[in-house]
């Protein structure tokens, strides 16, 4: 056991090296409500004003270091911190015997209430007032200043977990990586890191106890490792190499091709026309997963085939002449649609959802397929190649019934592989349908019996789990044998290393969030088919998720 | 006591930057200077040296306010500021 590193779940690849800076949350001890002796009140007033000055000066210093809008906002906040309107109100409270921390809290509360009553732009100011309050109280109580840390230079932001408000002012030029003790691949932290394009590791158990403020840490968002005490030279080399990799991603234009020449189809996951139009100019060769829930989840009554058709057509029109894989409604009691009465279910993930709901409600599937066919038929100019697949298929009978209804409308019929029963009998299922697409998020959830949304189960909801890899490999092999396409949509396809393993298994297409395509494409361009196959064999021989990733990495980098 | 009625000139009203500029000017005087909405009662004015107090007036562009102080020069300076568009 190495005492200078911890491993969590890497969610955004990349390497960064900088001192750790912790997000501080104000954890107030019980406030002293007792009345001050008259003789102590003047000293308490001075203490209050000194704390106000310290906090206001810090805002000013930050303003001086910032430019543009950030400078203006911070200067204004410094002014509010010093404002005599609230400081006099607080001083008056101290003069009557209230202790300074309580006086600050009460004085600011009065203004917050007034501003909230005024509404609009005034109400927005209350965030600043509360920030001032927290910082002054922390200063008075001798606690670390709450909020985003602001050390000199670049830093790695560390936190138990990050809330949207915490990350509002994050500057990716200075915050070079995010590391959290809690959270999972879909937590807010991960989403923010992806947006900012900075390396991110979540679910690092023991982080708070192990990494002190200011410790230089090397963060690897690919392996999930957080190391400290790394020699400066070694760290600099790793960071430089990573910068090269990022540059390769920036300059990658597609289409995806292995170093040995084989093509791999990279597709985009979209949920509506806007997302499809955004994905169209990228290197995506089509849509690999069009989630159709959006048109249903907000509708008070079931949209007609015609209404649905208009929605679907928007996506098709973004990709004329290209493949668009439409997934039929994947709703149920976990994602309820307002117009379907849901019986309470103890385990909604295992309940009436996906194709089970489409079959259970008379005509729901037929109307959706009519809408899809209408969208295709009404498309002007070059038509998209429309494939349709059903979510949550578990039995051969379901697959057969779905394929019949779909083909009756002259559409290509496929199924999602999310339930392990489908992966286990993949060859039999492939006799019923034209293609399959593996939804790794749900396949992992059902294989490992671990809720994909549970932050403390991130180690189980990891697609590198060997059992999951075996089910994927089995499905891919069945596809190769049947000569039918088997793709992967889901988080796994967006992991550049895992993408190599999937290709090595025989997966023919990878569908992912549009932003992930270049990273996957650039990585695939660096490896030969034989390396991918070796990586797949090695990963399948592993007995833990960590070793599976490690051996795959070795095969891909040698 | 000197007193002047003026109409708020700033597009955002007496908010943020205008409020801060007015408060900074008022704080230069030792005399008490107050601002109140014209429709409110005399004596209900807020401290013109505090941008937070000024903001509690919720005075938008076009609102009429009253500046009051024993120092006539102070009243004139603050009133002139209120009339301008300070956010421009």
Image: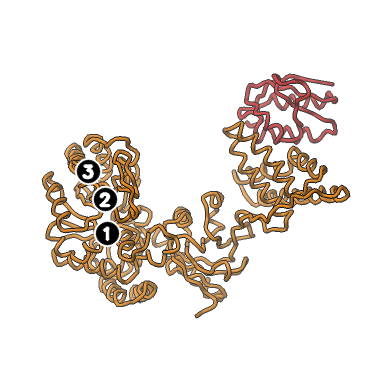
Chain colours: A orange, B red
Residue at the far bottom in the pictured view: A1
Secondary element at image label 2: loop
The residue located at (80%, 45%) in the rendering is A94
The quadrant of the picture occupied by the C terminus of chain A is: bottom left
Residue beneath label 1, please?
A418
Label 2 crowding class (10 Å Cα cut-off): few <14, some 14-19, many 20+? many
Q: Is residue B15 above or below residue A402?
A: above
Question: In x, y percent, where is residue A410?
Answer: 12, 46
Is residue A255 visible to us here? Answer: no
Could you tell which of marks 1 and 2 lies nearer the N-terminus?
Answer: 2
x, y percentage for residue A498? 33, 66
- Which chain is home to disc 1? A
Q: Residues within 10 Å of mark 3 (few under 14, many from 20)?
A: few
Position above or below: B3 against A14: above
B1 left or right, relative to A436: right
Between disc 2 and disc 3, the foreground one is 3
Question: Where A64 falls versus B71 (above or below)?
Answer: below
Vertical comparison of A307 with A264: above or below = above
Mark 2 and mark 3: Cα distance apart in space: 11 Å
Helix, strand, or loop for circle 1?
loop
Secondary structure beneath label 3: loop
Which chain's residue wears label 3? A
């Amino acid at each position: 056991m190495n005492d200078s590193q911890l491993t969590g779940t890497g969610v955004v690849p990349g390497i960064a090296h900088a001192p750790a800076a912790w997000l501080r949350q104000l954890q107030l001890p019980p406030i002293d409500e007792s009345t001050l002796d008259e003789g102590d009140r003047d000293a308490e007033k001075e203490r209050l004003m000194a704390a106000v000055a310290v906090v206001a000066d810090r805002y000013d210093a930050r303003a001086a270091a910032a430019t543009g809008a950030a400078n203006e906002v911070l200067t204004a906040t410094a002014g509010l911190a010093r404002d005599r309107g609230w400081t006099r109100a607080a001083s008056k409270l101290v003069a009557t015997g209230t202790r300074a921390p309580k006086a600050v809290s009460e004085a600011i509360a009065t203004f917050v209430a007034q501003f909230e009553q005024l509404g609009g732009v005034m109400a927005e100011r209350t965030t600043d007032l509360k920030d001032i309050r927290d910082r002054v109280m922390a200063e008075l109580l001798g606690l670390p200043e709450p909020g985003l840390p602001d050390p000199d230079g670049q830093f790695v932001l560390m936190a138990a977990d990050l809330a949207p408000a915490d990350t509002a002012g994050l500057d990716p030029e200075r915050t070079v990586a995010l590391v959290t003790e809690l959270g999972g691949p879909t937590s807010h932290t991960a989403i923010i890191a992806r947006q900012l394009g900075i390396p991110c590791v979540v679910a690092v158990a023991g982080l708070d106890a192990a990494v002190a403020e200011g410790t230089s840490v090397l963060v690897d968002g690919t392996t999930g490792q957080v190391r400290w005490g790394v020699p400066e030279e070694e760290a600099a080399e790793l960071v430089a190499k990573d910068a090269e990799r990022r540059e390769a991603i920036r300059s990658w234009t597609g289409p995806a091709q292995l170093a040995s020449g084989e093509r791999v189809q990279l597709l985009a996951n979209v949920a509506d026309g806007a997302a499809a139009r955004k994905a169209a100019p990228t290197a995506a060769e089509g849509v690999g997963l069009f989630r159709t829930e959006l048109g249903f989840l907000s509708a008070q009554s079931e949209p007609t085939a015609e209404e649905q058709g208009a929605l679907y057509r928007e996506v098709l029109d973004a990709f004329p002449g290209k493949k668009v894989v439409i997934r039929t409604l994947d709703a149920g009691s976990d994602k309820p649609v307002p117009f379907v009465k849901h019986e309470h279910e103890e385990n909604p993930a295992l309940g009436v959802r996906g194709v089970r709901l489409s079959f259970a409600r008379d005509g729901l599937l037929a109307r959706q397929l009519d809408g899809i066919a209408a969208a295709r038929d009404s498309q002007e100019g070059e038509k998209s190649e429309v494939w349709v697949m059903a979510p949550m298929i578990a039995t051969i009978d379901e697959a057969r019934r779905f394929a019949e209804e779909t083909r009756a409308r002259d559409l290509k019929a496929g199924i999602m592989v999310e339930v392990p029963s489908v992966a286990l009998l993949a060859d039999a299922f492939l006799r019923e349908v034209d293609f399959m697409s593996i939804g790794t998020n749900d396949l992992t959830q059902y294989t490992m019996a671990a809720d994909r949304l549970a932050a403390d189960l991130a180690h189980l909801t990891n697609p590198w789990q060997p059992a999951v890899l075996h089910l994927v490999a089995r499905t891919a092999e069945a596809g190769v044998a049947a000569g039918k396409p088997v793709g992967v949509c889901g988080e796994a396809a967006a992991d550049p290393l895992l993408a190599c393993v999937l290709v090595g298994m025989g997966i023919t297409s990878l569908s992912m969030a549009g932003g992930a395509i270049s990273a996957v494409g650039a990585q695939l361009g660096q490896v030969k088919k034989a390396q991918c196959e070796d990586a797949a064999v090695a990963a399948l021989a592993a007995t833990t998720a960590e070793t599976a990733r490690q051996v795959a990495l070795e095969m891909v980098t040698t | 006591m000197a007193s002047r009625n003026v109409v708020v000139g700033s597009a955002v009203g007496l908010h943020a930057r205008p409020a801060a500029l007015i408060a900074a000017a008022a704080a230069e005087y030792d005399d008490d200077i107050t601002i109140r909405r014209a429709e409110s009662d005399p004596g209900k004015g807020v401290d013109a040296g505090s941008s937070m107090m000024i903001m509690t007036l919720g005075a938008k562009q076009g609102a009429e306010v009253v500046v009051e102080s024993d120092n006539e020069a102070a009243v004139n300076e603050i009133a002139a500021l209120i009339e301008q568009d300070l956010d421009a």
